Amino acid sequence: MFSFYEISVYEVFAALGYIILIFCFARIQWRRDFSKTVVYSLSNLIGALLLAISIWGDVFSWAAFLAYLTWALISLYGVYRCFKYAYRGAPK
């Protein structure tokens, strides 16, 4: 029988990361210019980091960890670009 007491912290991180990433993907489909916002890049970064942390739990997978880490690094670059262009001003 399933019990909520059996859910680990890693499973909560995985679920939150998954929800965040799926929400970002859905928002891209609904509103394409959402990808140009810092909220999109930060959400992707947080989701990818939560998923990367979650695999440290029961079963570690280097392939999954590297995939999530790469996703997080690309998202971090997106955050950098958003702040860079916001600081410099909107492109003309």
Image (spheres, helix red, strand yellow):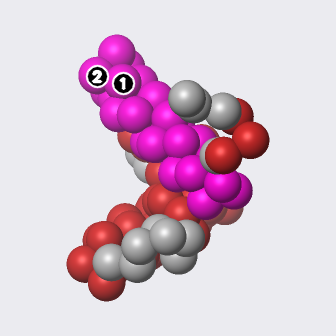
State left or right for residue 10 relative to residue 72: right
* Magenta-colored stretch includes residue 25: yes
> 42 or 18, which is in the foreground?
18
Tell me the amino acid under the disc marked 1: Ala
At horizontal 28% and vertical 22% (from top left) the residue drawn is 29
- Say the numbered circle drawn on residue 29: 2
Disc 1 on helix, strand or loop?
helix
> 77 or 65, which is in the foreground?
65
* Magenta-colored stretch includes residue 45: no
At horizontal 53% and vertical 76% (from top left) the residue drawn is 56
Q: Could you give the CA–CA distance between mark 1 and mark 2, rounded to whole angstroms?
A: 5 Å
Q: Residue 45: x, y in percent? A: 53, 59
> 59 or 86, which is in the foreground?
59
Q: Is residue 30 above or below residue 24?
A: above
Circle 1 residue: 26
The quadrant in which the C terminus is found is: top left
State left or right for residue 68 relative to residue 55: left
Q: Residue 10: x, y in percent? A: 61, 59
Q: Residue 37: x, y in percent? A: 52, 41
The quadrant in which the N terminus is found is: top right
Q: Which residues are magenta?
A: 8-33
Give the residue furthest to the front: 1
Q: Residue 25: x, y in percent? A: 35, 33
Q: Can residue 35 be seen at all in this image of the molecule?
A: yes
- Say the numbered circle drawn on residue 18: none
At horizontal 49% and vertical 70% (from top left) the residue drawn is 58
At horizontal 46% and vertical 29% (from top left) the residue drawn is 23
Q: Is residue 65 above or below residue 36?
A: below
